Image (cartoon, rainbow, N blue to C red):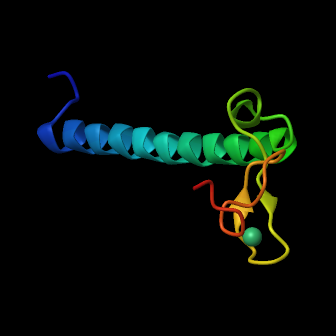
Amino acid sequence: MLGFSIPKILLLIFIILLVWYAFKVIEKRTSLQKTRSSNKGKSQSSKYKSENTQDLEKCPACSNYFMPGSKCTECNPTK
Ligand SMILES: [Zn+2]
């Protein structure tokens, strides 16, 4: 009557699912590339470095990392 048979409808659904899946994969891939490239560009001024974190200094004697402005906690224990 309508020219549709169940195998045709199933094939259509299969094609739609295939296209949807391919689109999802491509979208995921491009978003990964975007985050990668943006991380590269922002590595110096990222929000992780803005307020609460400081670069630790490395002790030349024991290679322990300590807060800049203070002395090495390994070589100069506080107590
Ligand atoms: Zn030290």
Residue projecting furthest to the bottom? 61
Q: Is residue 29 left or right of residue 55?
A: left
Q: Position of residue 26 (x, y in %)?
A: 57, 46
Q: Residue furthest front?
A: 79
Q: Could you tell me which residue is drawn at 45 percent across and 42 percent down?
A: 19
Q: Residue at x 20, y 30 (%)?
A: 4
Q: Quadrant of ligand 1?
A: bottom right
Q: Position of residue 49 (x, y in %)?
A: 75, 36
> Where on the picture, by quarter, is residue 14?
top left
On the picture, is 2 further left or further right than 40? Answer: left
Please count the marks in the image: 0
Q: Quadrant of residue 62?
A: bottom right
Looking at the image, is 17 positioned above or below residue 65?
above
Query: In the depicted view, which residue is nearer to us: 12 or 51?
Result: 51
- In this rendering, position of residue 22 left or right of residue 51: left
In the displayed structure, 3 sits above or below 73; it is: above
At 50% across and 48% down in the image, what residue appears? Answer: 25
> Is 25 or 14 nearer to us in this picture?
25
Q: Nearer the viewer, residue 7 or 77?
A: 77
In percent of width and height, residue 16 lies at 36, 37
Along the viewing direction, whichever of 30 and 23 lies nearer the viewer = 30
- Percent x, y for residue 24? 47, 41
Q: Tell me: 49 left or right of 16.
A: right
Which quarter of the figure is the N terminus placed in? Answer: top left
Quadrant in the picture for the C terminus: bottom right
Outermost residue, top direction?
2
